Image (spheres, rainbow, N blue to C red):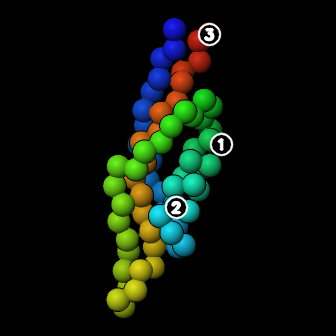
Amino acid sequence: MSVAKVIEIISSSNTSFEDAVSSGVAKAAESLQGITGAWVQDQSVKVKDGKVTEYRVVLKLTFILKND
């Protein structure tokens, strides 16, 4: 039997939403093993002088807990 856990992370990028998602998952994978999925809960942008300066995403990550 497998047990999964879901956590929430926030990631940002100066390039795009896609980059924010990819870099967030990659960073989480450095300390979490068994990530099986991710979904974007929310997206937002930071704006300065009428231009988008940062893309932010709130991600829910699912990973399988180890059976010891």
Q: Name the residue under label 3.
A: 68
What amino acid type is highlighted by mark number 1? Glu
What amino acid type is highlighted by mark number 2? Glu
Query: Could you classify mark 3 by the number of other residues whose Cα lies within 10 Å: few (under 14), some (14-19), or many (20 or more)?
Result: few
> Closer to the camera: disc 1 or disc 2?
2
- The one nearer the camera, 17 or 46, is 17
Q: Where is residue 51 in the image (x, y as percent from the top left)?
A: 40, 86
Q: Position of residue 67 (x, y in %)?
A: 59, 12
Residue under the image location 42 percent in, 32 percent down:
6
Q: Mark 1 points at which residue?
A: 30
Name, please, the residue furthest toward the bottom.
49
Q: Mark 2 points at which residue?
A: 18
Query: Could you classify mark 2 by the number of other residues whose Cα lies within 10 Å: few (under 14), some (14-19), or many (20 or more)?
Result: some
> Closer to the camera: disc 2 or disc 3?
2
Answer with mark 3 or mark 1, whichever residue precedes in sequence. 1
Answer with mark 1 or mark 2, whichever residue precedes in sequence. 2
On the rendered structure, is 35 left or right of 43?
right
Residue under the image location 61 percent in, 49 percent down:
27
Look at the image and tell me in which quarter the C terminus lies: top right
On the rendered structure, is 46 left or right of 22?
left
Query: Could you classify mark 1 by the number of other residues whose Cα lies within 10 Å: few (under 14), some (14-19), or many (20 or more)?
Result: few
Q: Is mark 2 on a helix, strand or loop?
A: helix
Q: What element carries label 3?
A: loop
- Residue 44 vertical position relative to residue 48 in the rendered view, above or below: above
Q: Position of residue 50 (x, y in %)?
A: 35, 89
Residue under the image location 47 percent in, 23 percent down:
4
